[in-house]
């Protein structure tokens, strides 16, 4: 097996490197998906090339059938048993969203422990297109989170999705109509708990769409401390609720927990999807809380008081409050990331791909 041979070769090398996995079929980018990025031998990893116009017969006029949509996101991956040897030189592991093959947690649980000096993980899986097994997938994610190597300092998880794909699957056009995914990802509370617990060992954590920040902070115990955590970035649908009361409640709870994050420099709670982009950011250096997005919010006095306590404890100075509203067109979560200025939540090339691919819609 190629991966086993690769590990055997890398085990003999010295120094450090970044290891990225990808898997695709050459036919993936043909026919129904010529406007998508899958990776290729001649791929420029540092700049996303402009999308070419698709064949009219397979795009815009005719939407891909459900089985074609799901085929590009096949579930599964190789299992290695005891064949993999430790590789000392891997410091950073990447699985970007252009890898649409759904490698489950079982495979990653075999790979990640083989990197004893691993310091950073960038993981960009896609939301499942088979709704009934999402809970099984989440159980795998939960085990993976709880077994992350303790030496990993930085974790970035970005669960990608394409709203146009989800809209097509929601139509139930195939015999698998009962297997369609939820139109909006339903976050699993146990994943929020696991990320919260393990975040106490990290220096930098960003999790987008896989969990809801509400579950993360609800799980935090008053006695917990975060002696290493410097940056924390999470998503929550509470951020786009028309009634700002739930948003304020969330932000008050976040402030309560932030008091126990002694090294915290930046904390952001955000959300983005088509037509929606909002973010709340606390910056220790500037002693500010900053609301930005395409919708306004009235920050309640209890919210301001809660964050005043954080600012005073962390910097000994009073809190500053800033707002920035914009009217930019938001066609996708990728546009939201761009306009909110959150480049650290997803790989740079992945963000370019997301924004380009989400300009296409069949409905």
Image: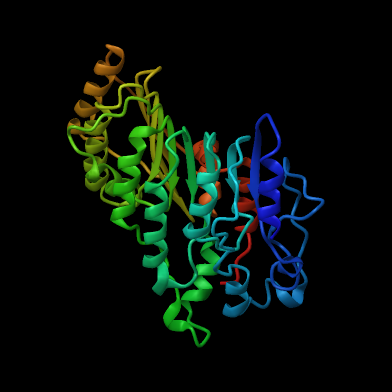
Image spot of residue 175 (x, y percent): 50, 88
Give the residue displayed 24% in from the left and 26% down from the top. Answer: 259
17 or 250, nearer to the observer:
17
Which quarter of the rendered picture does the N terminus lie within?
bottom right
Corner quadrant of residue 260: top left
Corner quadrant of residue 346: top right
State the residue lying farthest toward the front: 82
300 or 182, nearer to the observer:
182
Image spot of residue 230 (x, y percent): 40, 26
Left or right: 248 in relation to 62: left
Image spot of residue 184 (x, y percent): 40, 63
Is any atom of residue 329 visible in this view?
A: no
Left or right: 358 in relation to 158: right
Q: Is residue 234 above or below residue 61?
A: above
Is any atom of residue 355 visible in this view?
A: yes
Left or right: 168 in relation to 210: right
State the residue lying farthest toward the right: 42
Give the residue displayed 39% in from the left and 74% down from the top. Answer: 132
Give the residue displayed 56% in from the left and 72% down from the top. Answer: 363
Is the image coloured rainbow, by chain, by secondary structure, or in one colour? rainbow
Image spot of residue 173 (x, y percent): 52, 84
Left or right: 285 in relation to 56: left
109 or 272, nearer to the observer:
109
């Amino acid at each position: 097996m190629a991966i086993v041979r690769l590990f055997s070769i890398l085990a003999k090398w010295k120094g450090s490197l970044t290891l990225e996995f990808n898997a695709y079929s050459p036919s993936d980018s043909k026919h129904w998906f010529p406007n998508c990025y899958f990776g290729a031998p001649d791929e420029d990893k540092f700049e996303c090339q402009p999308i070419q116009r698709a064949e009219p017969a397979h795009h815009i006029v005719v939407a891909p059938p459900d089985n074609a949509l799901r085929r590009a996101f096949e579930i599964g991956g190789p299992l290695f048993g005891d064949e993999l040897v430790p590789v000392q030189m891997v410091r950073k592991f990447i699985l970007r969203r252009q890898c649409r093959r759904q490698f489950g947690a079982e495979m990653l649980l075999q790979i990640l422990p083989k990197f004893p000096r691993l310091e950073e993980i960038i993981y960009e899986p896609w939301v499942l297109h088979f709704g009934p097994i999402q809970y099984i997938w989440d159980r795998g994610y939960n085990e993976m989170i709880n077994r992350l190597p303790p030496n990993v300092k930085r974790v970035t998880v970005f669960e990608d999705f394409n709203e146009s794909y989800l809209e097509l699957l929601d139509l139930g056009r195939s015999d698998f109509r009962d297997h369609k995914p939820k139109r909006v990802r339903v976050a699993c509370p146990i994943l929020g708990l696991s990320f919260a617990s393990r975040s106490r060992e990290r220096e930098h954590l960003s999790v987008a769409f896989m969990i809801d920040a509400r579950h993360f902070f609800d799980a935090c115990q008053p006695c917990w401390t975060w002696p290493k955590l410097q940056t924390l970035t999470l998503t929550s649908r509470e951020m786009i609720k028309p009634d700002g009361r739930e948003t304020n409640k969330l932000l008050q709870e976040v402030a309560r927990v932030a008091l126990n994050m002694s090294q915290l420099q930046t904390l952001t709670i955000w959300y983005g999807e088509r037509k929606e982009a909002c973010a709340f950011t606390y910056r220790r250096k500037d002693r500010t809380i900053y609301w930005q997005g395409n919708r306004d919010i009235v920050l309640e006095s209890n919210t301001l008081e809660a964050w005043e306590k954080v600012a005073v404890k962390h910097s000994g100075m009073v809190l500053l409050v800033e707002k920035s509203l914009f009217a930019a067109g938001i066609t996708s979560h990728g546009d939201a990331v761009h306009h909110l200025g959150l480049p650290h939540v997803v790989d740079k090339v992945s963000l370019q791909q997301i924004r380009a691919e989400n300009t296409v819609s069949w409905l």
